[in-house]
Image (cartoon, rainbow, N blue to C red):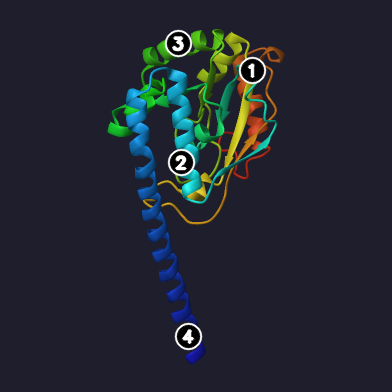
Amino acid sequence: MLPHTFDIRVNRTAIVFRSVLRIAYGSYAWLALLVVVTPCCILLACAPGLERRRRIARSTAKLFLLAIGTPVRLEGALVLTHSPCVVVANHASYLDGIILTAALPARFTYLIKHEMATFPLAGFVLRRLGSAFVNREDFLDRKRIARRLVDLAVKGDALAFFPEGTFDAMPGLKPFQLGAFSAAARAKLPVVPLVIHGARRKLPCGALFLSPGGELRVRICEPVNTQQHESARRVMRATRQAMLAHLDEPDLAPD
């Protein structure tokens, strides 16, 4: 019985060690976030000009991810700095917004669910960055935001969305909202699919602490030409297929 007892003790020790390591690393990550976000909020409150504030936010996001040992690695087409477009990305973690802010140029307007506007610190930051808030349960609000996004797209602004709208613990690409693709089709802008890797493992849904190790990658897929598709829904389908080709998770909304 001694070897069996020894194995149990070793396993328990390993579990305890991993738990302690995660708590220690997660606590450090929260401290690092506080350290970098505090001066960022002060700068965002004082800095004139939307583009300047977005550059500050981008630098802060990159600094935080570097501080916790997981800077974002970009892969793929790398076409985002040259022309207006609509970027759509998968959504798996609360880290996704920070990851996109670090990865994308500082000229993107983000569509955010309206609940985030009520978060004291996050709401302030998002408003100072010119984000658009939408209540997905309110049809009139969705139409209002859709008109604003089309206006922004027509003027040449770059837009970024999480078309799934939310995330949970179940891995997989959830059904898409049509709004981003309608705005892109009406403005005749390309849709650029992005696939975020590693965020779900780093901060799973419901977790309090970030996990140590791992890597964060953003795969930039080839743009989808909206003018080659007869409807926004077909643009959405083409975008979804491009994302699934690089996402190691199942399709939760098959046709």
Q: Which residue is mark 4?
A: 6
Q: CA distance from mark 3 to mark 4?
A: 64 Å
What number is the disc on residue 148? 3
| Place of residue 17 in the rendered image (x, y in percent of width and height, measured from the top left) | 43, 70
Residue type, numbered disc 3: Arg
Q: First in sequence: mark 2 or mark 3?
A: 2
Viewer-proximal residue among 113 and 42? 42
Please tell me whether mark 3 or mark 4 is closer to you in this view: 3
Q: CA distance from mark 3 to mark 1?
A: 20 Å
Viewer-proximal residue among 235 and 68? 68
Q: Which residue is mark 2?
A: 95
What number is the disc on residue 83? 1
Look at the numbered disc 1 and give the secondary structure of its residue: loop
Q: Mark 2 Cα within 10 Å, few/some/many (few <14, many 20+)?
A: some
Mark 3–mark 1 CB contact (< 8 Å): no
Residue type, numbered disc 2: Leu
* Residue at (60% x, 32% y) in the render: 194
